[in-house]
Structure formats: C-alpha cells, structure tokens
Image (spheres, rainbow, N blue to C red):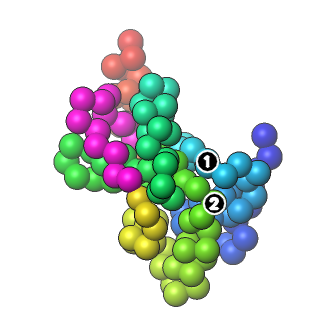
C-alpha cells in the first residue's frame, strides 16, 4: 500500500484528505481515521449506497457529532477542498459545507469508537475481553 504525503505540510487532516483523493485512481474513496479500531462493514456498505448524487457521505452520531474521518468522498471534493485550503480553512467539517453531502444518521447503528487517549485504548481492550 503506498504512503501518500501531504502536498502542503502543516495543513492538517483536510490537506491529507485532499492529497489522498488526488492520488487515488478511484472516483469514490472510503476514508477512516487510524484511531477507529473497528470497521462495521455492513455500515460501510449502507453508507456507500448513499453516494448517488452527492460528493460525500458523512455519518452523524446520535449526539449530532459528524465523523468526517469515517466517510466516503468523491474526487469531486478536490477542487472545493483546495479552494478552502487556499482560503486558510483547515477543518474538514467547514470545507464540507460547500459540498453536496449526505449526512448518514447513525440511529440504530453500532456507535463509532475513537481511541484518542491511552485510557480509551485500555478501556477498549477490556471491553473486547
């Protein structure tokens, strides 16, 4: 698997996402953060089915949080993201406001877990038994 470097260093996840989309040979790409330990493939398939007529499918958790790093993106996002980066925007969720997005409701789905801290990791390992 190739490693894709950011085209412009120090511009955060939006730059990384834009660089990966630009390097991909696929029109649609599923992106997942490294701190999400479990991938529910049935959820991914349901999300993929929503890619018709939108540039991104972003899950929205029950508490309203969006998960832009567990999402589908079309290469159509590249010029929008580049424009946002050129304007100094670094946040994916704000750049997405200019894209046609389907906000996938997570009601009834297995909640996504992010392991951001050591204690999150330890709790997850305990849960897994």
Res 79 quadrant in image: bottom right
Residue 27 on image: x %, y %: 66, 52
- The span picked out in magenta is 102-114
Mark number displayed over residue 75? 2
Name the N-terminal-most of marks 2 and 1. Answer: 1
Q: Which residue is farthest right?
A: 2
In the rendered view, would you say 6 is above or below 45? below
Tags 2 and 1 touching, CB below 8 Å: yes
In the rendered view, would you say 107 is above or below 57? above
- SS type, badge 2: loop
Residue shown at the point (69%, 74%) measured from the top left? 8
In the rendered view, would you say 89 is above or below 126? below
Q: Tell which of 53 and 113 is nearer to you.
A: 53
In the rendered view, would you say 91 is above or below 129? below
Residue 119 on image: x %, y %: 36, 37
* Residue 85 seen: no
Residue shown at the point (56%, 47%) measured from the top left? 31
Alpha carbon distance from label 2 to label 1: 8 Å
Question: Where is the N terminus found, in terms of image quarters?
Answer: top right
* Residue 48 seen: yes
Residue shown at the point (38%, 53%) measured from the top left? 102
Residue that mark 1 sits on: 29
Q: Is residue 64 magenta?
A: no
Q: Tell which of 19 and 126 is nearer to you.
A: 19
Q: Is residue 113 magenta?
A: yes
Q: Main secondary structure of the magenta part?
A: loop
Question: Where is the C terminus found, in terms of image quarters?
Answer: top left
10 Å crowding of disc 1: few (<14), some (14-19), many (20+) = some
Q: Which residue is farthest bottom?
A: 87
- Count of numbered marks: 2
Residue shown at the point (72%, 70%) measured from the top left? 7
């Amino acid at each position: 698997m190739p490693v894709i470097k950011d085209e412009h260093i120090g511009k955060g996840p939006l730059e990384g996402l834009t660089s990966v989309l630009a390097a991909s040979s696929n029109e649609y790409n599923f992106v997942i953060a490294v701190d999400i330990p479990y991938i529910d493939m049935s959820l991914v398939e349901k999300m993929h089915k929503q890619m018709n007529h939108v540039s991104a499918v972003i899950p929205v958790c029950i508490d309203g949080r969006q998960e832009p790093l567990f999402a589908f993106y079309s290469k159509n996002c590249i010029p929008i993201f580049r424009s946002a980066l050129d304007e100094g925007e670094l946040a994916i969720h704000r750049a997405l406001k200019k894209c046609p997005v389907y906000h996938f409701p997570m009601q009834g789905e297995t909640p996504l877990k992010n392991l951001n801290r050591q204690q999150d990791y330890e709790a997850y390992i305990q849960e897994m038994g």
